[in-house]
Image (tube, grey):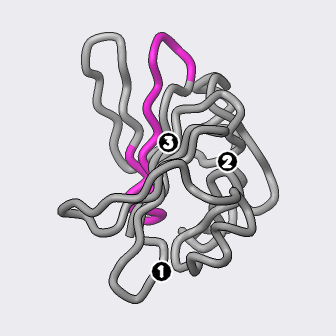
Amino acid sequence: GQALVTSDDIKIGGVKLGMSQEDVTGMLGKPESKSVDVLGLLWKFEKPAMKVYFNKKGKVTLVSSKDPLTKISVNGKTFKISDSLADVKKILGEPYQEDKIGDSIELYYIDQGLTVTIYKGKVSNVMLAE
């Protein structure tokens, strides 16, 4: 069977959970904006469009993107925003839970902390969170 993927094996736009602010700047450059909300310190990037949250220790706790340029890497295999539902399942297998909401499907990979949104058959958003 497939080796169990953990959140440690997943990168969104090269960013993974637990990375430092320096690591993120090294991958994505300087953020377009920084702000603080209930989830912590939020850095927003425009190219590619990504959101990265940090905790008080300055470590990544959440990363999300809806940009077609963003690659999601899982153990070295990649899919990207705008790929199909089949592409995602080929790499990640069946989700823990799947919810249909209108034209969207939310795929919850609970063990990995990954949520993939499918809109009209294609990936429209990915979020990796602790």
Q: Is residue 28 left or right of residue 97?
A: right
Three-letter code, disc 2: Ile
Label 2 crowding class (10 Å Cα cut-off): few <14, some 14-19, many 20+?
many
Residue assigned mark 2: 72
Label 1 crowding class (10 Å Cα cut-off): few <14, some 14-19, many 20+?
many
Residue 1 visible, this orientation: no
Q: Point out the tag, 3 or 2, that comes first from the N-terminus.
A: 2
Rendered image quadrant of residue 119: top left
Residue at position x 52%, y 41% in the image: 65
Q: In this view, does 86 lie above or below 59?
A: above
Q: Is mark 2 on a helix, strand or loop?
A: strand
Residue assigned mark 1: 59
Q: Are marks 3 and 2 in contact (CB under 8 Å)?
A: yes
Residue at position x 41%, y 58% in the image: 34
Residue assigned mark 3: 126
Gap in Å between the C-alphas at discs 1 and 3?
19 Å
First to last magenta residue range: 108-122
Q: Point out the tag, 2 or 1, that comes first from the N-terminus.
A: 1
Three-letter code, disc 3: Val
Q: Is residue 101 above or below residue 5?
A: above
Query: Residue 105 at what x, y percent from top left?
Result: 37, 25
Gap in Å between the C-alphas at discs 3 and 2?
8 Å
Gap in Å between the C-alphas at discs 2 and 1?
19 Å
Q: Point out the tag, 1 or 3, that comes first from the N-terminus.
A: 1
Q: In this view, does 59 lie to the left or right of 79?
A: left
Closer to us: 119 or 29: 29
